[in-house]
Amino acid sequence: MFAKVIIDQDAKALDRVFEYKIPEDLDLNVGARVYVPFGSRVLQGYVIDLNENCEYDEGKLKSIISTLDEQPVIKRELLDLMHFMVKKNHLKYSSTLRLFLPSEMREGRVKELFENFYSLNLDKIDQVSTRAKKQIEAVAYLKENGKTSSAILKEMFGQSAIKALFDKGVLNKEKEQVLRVPSFTKMTQKRVTLNEYQQNAIDSICEDKTYLLHGVTGSGKTEVYMNLIERELADGKNAIMLVPEISLTPQIMSNFKSRFGDLVALLHSGLSAGERYDEWKRLFSGQARIAIGARSAIFAPLDNLGIIIIDEEHEQSYISESNPRYDTHDVAEFRARANKCPLVLGSATPSIDSYQKAKEEAYQLIELPVRANGKEMPIVETIDMMNELRAGNSGMFSNKLLAELVNVVNNKKQAMIFINRRGYSSFMRCRECGYIAKCSDCDVSLVYHREDNRLKCHYCGKQYRVLSRCPKCKSENIKQGAVGTEQVADKLKEMFPQVKVLRMDNDTTSTKNSHQKILEEFKNSKPGILVGTQMIAKGHDFEDVILVGIVDGDQTLYHTDYRSSERTFQLITQVAGRAGRSQAEGKVILQTYSPKHYVYKFASNYDYKGFYRKEINVRATAQFPPYTRIIRILFSDINENNVRELLKICYTEIEKLKAKYGADIIYMDAMKSPIQRVQGKYRYQIMMRLNLPNADAIENDAFEIVDKASKTSVFFEINPQNLS
Ligand code: ADP
Ligand code: ZN
Ligand code: ZN
């Protein structure tokens, strides 16, 4: 017998399938980790296939040395997935396989946790003195409960009693492995009666296909997910549920833990290495049957899946932007089809891509049009900040927002103030007339680059001088820059010294559990104001939040991405959904310098469909995805000459594809990346925009050219989220 093996090494030259002989006495299965001889070294690898015959010269093949684990660690379905991902995303085998195992396992960093357990030695029980009360109690307890961990016994009956019993030989000691299960505050949960829309969703979602669950904020999607999973468990199947970022949604976690107990395993980066490893093992062994986590949980080692759910499917975090790059939607789709089970994409604001697929009936659309508690959506009031300026208010809060804040404080309620801030980049805007500096070729806003004090277009690379005067109204009051959370929080503290003002952003949440601490503190602060970035936009369910203020809605709108309008619409809808979730009426104050922009018009009416119709037209006219495909090929190297040389060679070759594909290559150019150096490596890129019918073919041809020319990895990004 022969084995096909992938070597667990980063070098590009080693990233292919090698064949080995299998020694007679070695019991080997697909998915096992093995040691193999390689040149003069011994390396680790993964067995991805077994064959009767070999393809190479048998005389030259070496033999596998040994296996690392008793059983294979990668399930068959995931090996199929590996082939799919390698091809689709132009990935390396080794880095793809690593997605399937907890990193702790590869690096051998985590020790399995063992604990002492005691059981009774019945022959020696008469040795216990009738006056040793604690010892008698301990014996009685063990009679009833059987083998018990030393930690529990010592806690219940005291260290000395247990030691005395052990010394007398009354207790037998043995070591056993225990799994670390992350703790979660469970909430007592009342069972709700499903409304007709929820019931309809649950009944409809039962086939081997993809469903888009479009439910307004507060429509009770979580309840639908839990019912679906419950049904599949009862049918003997397993489930995966993805959430954008666990630290932001502790409530969802508690809900699932209370409903499903230890059948739930959590997979996310906030766990300790030991916890993560043990949770993975509980899934692998079948002790846990529901995997919940951020995007990497899509690789959970579960077979026999009955359902896969992606909550908040529009979230960017489902796209891995660092190596290995992949889109969780594709992976989920692959696994769902492999298991012949439904895939559910849930959102109040589906991505334009997904909604278009639903329109074209590639997905089945299911709607939850009303809030589960029967409340109306909060009213959104749009404030024109140019008017405020003209009226002499140049501060960051409109008079209306201030008045509402005073009302919150007087009534001892709560407010959330949202600062729409993504990344570091910012655009240039005239404070007098609202003019925004845009690229003359691309119709996206220019990004200010501090390093060289220039404005740049992130799509074509064109550069512009920083403006000192507005081209439209000639005012000199044209600036780049944005208000930050800290500035806003400080201002609020100054204005409302008696009110608890909390801040949640990247700076205040760098330590473990800091999200939860801030949310906990906010929960208990009445009156209270929580100032934050995107982090406060989703998932939270605070009863006393009656006001949501959006300080500067425009900051994503004039971002440099063709998805800017989509992102802004999503954010405003999500943030607005935080207000008025219980008895009290909620209100949303949306401050903007562009009150007439269609995003605000549709967002303030919660009109997703209207927004979709407008936006999909814009995309069609401007030839942006989903009507075209954008590809960025990113080259990087420590040596700038090398990377320029490689870029030149590749560009010249790829350009020849124009002869073959003609106008299907809508646009193509080579340039420095907007961020020119990362970790000492120079970055250059080729940007392409392709017509869809030939996009796969062009992409594959380009990949082959680049792959042949380059000794190191080059990254292919499809419709990149971020062009830095
Ligand atoms: P979504 O995720 O769609 O924004 P949630 O799942 O957070 O909404 O549900 C919002 C609130 O409605 C939760 O407090 C939930 O317990 C409650 N809820 C869900 N379904 C029902 C129902 N059928 N009847 C009453 N309340 C419900
Ligand atoms: Zn441009
Ligand atoms: Zn102007």
Image (cartoon, rainbow, N blue to C red):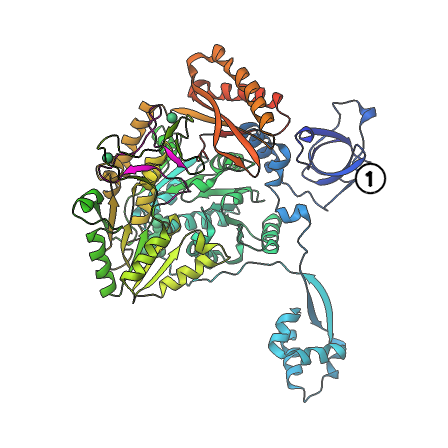
Q: Nearer the viewer, residue 315 or 389?
A: 389
Q: In the figure, residue 616 lies in which quadrant?
A: top left
Q: Which residues are magenta?
A: 421-449
Q: Kindly identify the residue that appears in the image at 41 percent across and 60 percent down.
A: 518
The residue closer to the viewer here, 413 or 306, is 413
Q: Residues within 10 Å of mark 1 (few under 14, many from 20)?
A: few
Whole-percent x and y of residue 212?
Answer: 38, 38
Please tell me whether residue 604 is drawn above or below residue 156 in the rendered image.
above
Give percent across and percent down for residue 324: 56, 36
In the image, is residue 139 above or below residue 496?
below
Q: How many marks?
A: 1
Element carrying mark 1: loop
Give the image quarter of residue 641: top right
Tell me the quadrant of ligand 3. Answer: top left
Q: Which residue is mark 1?
A: 25
Q: Is residue 578 magenta?
A: no
Q: Does any atom of ligand 1 lie closer than 8 Å to the CB of label 1?
A: no
Residue 306 spot, x, y in % from top left: 50, 43
Taking the spot 27% from the left edge, 50% from the top edge, the residue there is 396
Q: Between 202 and 184, which is closer to the camera in this rendering? A: 184
The three-letter code of the residue at mark 1 reads Asp
